Every structure is written in structure tokens, then in C-alpha cells.
Amino acid sequence: MSDTKAEATGLETTAATSPTPVKRSFGSKVAAHFKKWWWLHLIIFVIVVLVVVLPVVYVGYPNIAKHDVNDSTLEITSMVISDPSPDSFQLNQTQVIGSDSSYHPKIYAFDAAVSLAGAAASFANVRVPSVKSEDGAQVEVNQLVDLGDVGAFGDYAKAVMLQEEVALNIYGKPDLKQGSLPKITVTYNKTVTMKGLNQLKGFDVTDFHILLKKENGRNMKGNVYIPNPSVMTINMGNLTLDLSVAGKPMGQSYLDNLVLKPGNNTVPMTSTVDQSAIIKMITSDDNPYKDGLVPFDIVGNSSFYNGKELPYFTKALASNNLTVHLNVTKALAEIGLTNI
Ligand SMILES: *[C@@H]1O[C@H](CO)[C@@H](O)[C@H](O)[C@H]1NC(C)=O
Ligand SMILES: *[C@@H]1O[C@H](CO)[C@@H](O)[C@H](O)[C@H]1NC(C)=O
Ligand SMILES: *[C@@H]1O[C@H](CO)[C@@H](O)[C@H](O)[C@H]1NC(C)=O
Ligand SMILES: *[C@@H]1O[C@H](CO)[C@@H](O)[C@H](O)[C@H]1NC(C)=O
Ligand SMILES: *[C@@H]1O[C@H](CO)[C@@H](O)[C@H](O)[C@H]1NC(C)=O
Ligand SMILES: *[C@@H]1O[C@H](CO)[C@@H](O)[C@H](O)[C@H]1NC(C)=O
Ligand SMILES: *[C@@H]1O[C@H](CO)[C@@H](O)[C@H](O)[C@H]1NC(C)=O
Ligand SMILES: *[C@@H]1O[C@H](CO)[C@@H](O)[C@H](O)[C@H]1NC(C)=O
């Protein structure tokens, strides 16, 4: 109704100013309509924005973002544990994000709780730096980690020592921003699988020699081969290992300043062995090791770094039993003891 009135008024004005009244074009009708009804269109526009755009921005986009964050993968390509103390260590870790999303939001720095997957407690909080989420993006974490729960880290170290694969859970609530869209908070709950030390399978004493004259109180020295299939470099400090043969203690071995690097490690090992007990054993009438090969059981006793015991490495070492067969006859022959 008011529409016709408006047009009528419009016509009157036209008629008054122009001697030859022209039929109004569609365009000018539309223009006039908007001139009068701009507010109604504004309200409709605002409603459309609220009804269509807002859910997209505040529901759709966060859902897509959450979905993409959930779908993304994380691969730890390097992990260096150095300068350990009973309740802290320096962590230098590189991880690579995998994502097939077409969105590349900025993920703001956040605190992540790191735990052995399935464990009741996390062992540390790590500050993850800000990163643009795109396939292949690298995240570097270089920080001194305070162990919130030393026992939980001991469990992790033990899992690393014994298992072929270890699942690490990283949990946090980072803020995320895509272009000019609002900042949202997402839950980052990612379980990363990485290779462990797999019980040091392949560990071997590559050579060993009896020292007639003790060096630093040690009477045997040689080299050990320690394979490390993981991407971890671990400064383990000074290790003491207990030696036994058929349950009988035979002394201790030492790996000083052991830094286990990814791949094959060949490091020196010294020992303090009970030589007379060993000689007595293999010269006895009931010596079971006629071919000279004696099976030594090796189990970790302790890990010390800068004079302090590292309970988590001690725990990990104590959990693993190794057996090496050493040709004692050969070692004795080297020092001139033959036909014993
Ligand atoms: C996250 O991804 C896992 C599989 O990767 C799936 O089982 C789970 O339902 C997803 N969660 C959400 C909230 O999308
Ligand atoms: C770890 O990163 C820090 C800071 O980038 C650096 O100073 C340190 O040398 C790194 N340590 C190792 C063992 O790579
Ligand atoms: C993370 O996800 C796993 C299952 O994928 C779930 O068991 C765990 O409770 C979640 N962590 C937190 C802190 O919600
Ligand atoms: C490590 O040693 C094994 C055999 O003991 C060998 O097959 C492998 O190629 C070596 N790896 C490297 C990186 O040298
Ligand atoms: C560790 O070695 C010490 C001697 O250095 C010994 O008294 C102790 O019993 C050993 N501990 C274990 C768990 O074998
Ligand atoms: C290991 O022991 C040696 C000799 O006692 C010492 O000089 C060295 O500092 C120790 N290493 C560490 C990492 O504590
Ligand atoms: C290691 O050996 C000890 C006895 O020497 C035994 O009690 C323990 O169960 C063994 N551990 C493993 C993982 O085989
Ligand atoms: C141990 O060493 C001796 C002397 O070198 C050698 O005769 C013997 O065959 C070796 N035993 C084994 C099982 O290799």
C-alpha cells in the first residue's frame, strides 16, 4: 500500500518538473525502493549475516578447524635429551606436522602436557612455539624441561628402553586463527608413535681384554656395540652395570659419559670383574663352558650425571636384562694364560 503511495508521490514530482513525463525505468524504481526501504534491507542483511555467516564463522569454521587439527599428524624427527638432573633435562626436539587441509591457520604458542600414552599422569609440560599449520611445517622445542612427575618419566624411560615402539601423548588447548576469522581455542590431543630402544637388541661386547695392571681401579676393558633404532639422542651419564654368570655376581661394568645417538653406537666399556672367581669357574672340573664362551648377564645398576643419580634412567636400565657370550679362554690366552 505504501508502495503505491510512494510511486504516486514520485510521479507527481516528475510531472511537476518535467514537461514531458517519461515512464520510469526499472532501475530508478529499484533505486527509489532502496532509498525508501534501506533500513528494511539493512535489517534483512543483518539477519542474513547472523543466520548464515555467524554459524559458519562460529560453528562451521571451528568445527572444520577442530576436524583438521584432529586429522593432522605429528612426527618426531629428532629428540635430544641432554644435561639431565634428577628432576629436569634439556629437551631439543624437532617435529613435523602432516596435514592435507586447505586451511593453514596460525597455531599460537601453548603449553602441552607430555605423557606416555595411557599413563595416569603427564611427566612434563612443554611450551610449544607458535606455528603456521601446514604440511611439512617444523616445530622446534628447545627448552629445559622440569619433570613434574619423576616417576611418570621413569615409566616413559622404561618403555623407551623395553619397547619397539613407544606412544607419546601430547595434550594442550592452543588458540588458532585462520586469516581474518576470529581466534578460537581448539583441543590438541595427539598420540605420536616413535621407535624405542627395543631392549637394546643386538647389544654386544665387540672386544674385551684383561688388564694385568688396573686402570682407574678397573681390570678389564673393551668396546660394546649398542644399536639405537630410535631418533633419540640420550645423554645417560655414567652407567654402572652389574655382571653375573648363572646368578653369581662377577663384578661390574662401566659406560662412562654414555651419549646414545641414533643408529649404531660403539663405545668403550671398562669393568671390574672378579677374575679369580671366573678363572676358578672355568678351570673347575664341572666347568659347563668347555668352549671358553661364558654367558654374562648384564643388568643396569645406576646412572649418575654430575655426581647425582638419575632415578629414571636407573629404573630404565634395571628393567632390561642383557646376555653376552664372552670368550674367556681367548682373553686369558691374550695375557699368556693358556692350557688352564
Ligand atoms: C579424531 O580422529 C580420530 C581418528 O584419527 C577419530 O576416531 C575421532 O573420532 C576424531 N574425533 C573428532 C572429534 O573428529
Ligand atoms: C638445544 O637448543 C638450545 C637453544 O637453541 C641450544 O643452545 C643447545 O645447544 C641445544 N642443545 C643440543 C644438545 O642440541
Ligand atoms: C586424548 O584422547 C584419548 C583417546 O584418543 C583419550 O583416551 C584421552 O583421555 C584424551 N586426553 C584428554 C586429556 O582428554
Ligand atoms: C648398523 O649395524 C648393522 C649391523 O650390526 C648394519 O646392518 C647397519 O647397516 C648399521 N647401520 C648404520 C647406520 O651404520
Ligand atoms: C648396585 O651396585 C652396588 C655396588 O656398587 C651394589 O651394592 C648394589 O646392590 C647394586 N644394586 C643393584 C640393584 O644391583
Ligand atoms: C663420569 O665419571 C667421571 C669420572 O668419575 C667424571 O669425570 C665425569 O664428570 C662423570 N660424567 C658425568 C656426566 O657425570
Ligand atoms: C631380569 O633378571 C632378573 C633376575 O636376574 C629377573 O628378576 C627379571 O624378571 C628379569 N627381567 C626381565 C625383563 O627379563
Ligand atoms: C675361544 O677362543 C679360543 C682361543 O682363541 C678359541 O680356540 C675358541 O675356538 C674360541 N671359542 C669360540 C666358541 O669361539
Image: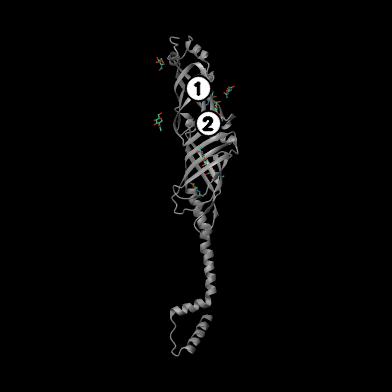
Provide the residue designation for mark 2.
Answer: 236
- Helix, strand or loop under label 1: strand
Amino acid type at mark 2:
Met
Using the image, tell me which numbered label, if any, was put on residue 270: 1
Answer yes or no: disc 2 within 8 Å of ligand 6.
Answer: no
Query: Residue visible at 53% across and 61% down?
Result: 54
Residue 170 percent coordinates (x, y): 53, 43
Residue 192 percent coordinates (x, y): 49, 41
- Helix, strand or loop under label 2: strand
Query: Residue visible at 48% across and 88% down?
Result: 17
Is residue 192 visible to the viewer in this orientation of the structure? yes
Is residue 246 visible to the viewer in this orientation of the structure? no
Amino acid type at mark 1:
Thr
Residue 113 percent coordinates (x, y): 56, 43
Compare residues 297 and 233 and report the one nearer the observer. Answer: 233
Image mark count? 2
Query: Residue visible at 48% across and 77% down?
Result: 31
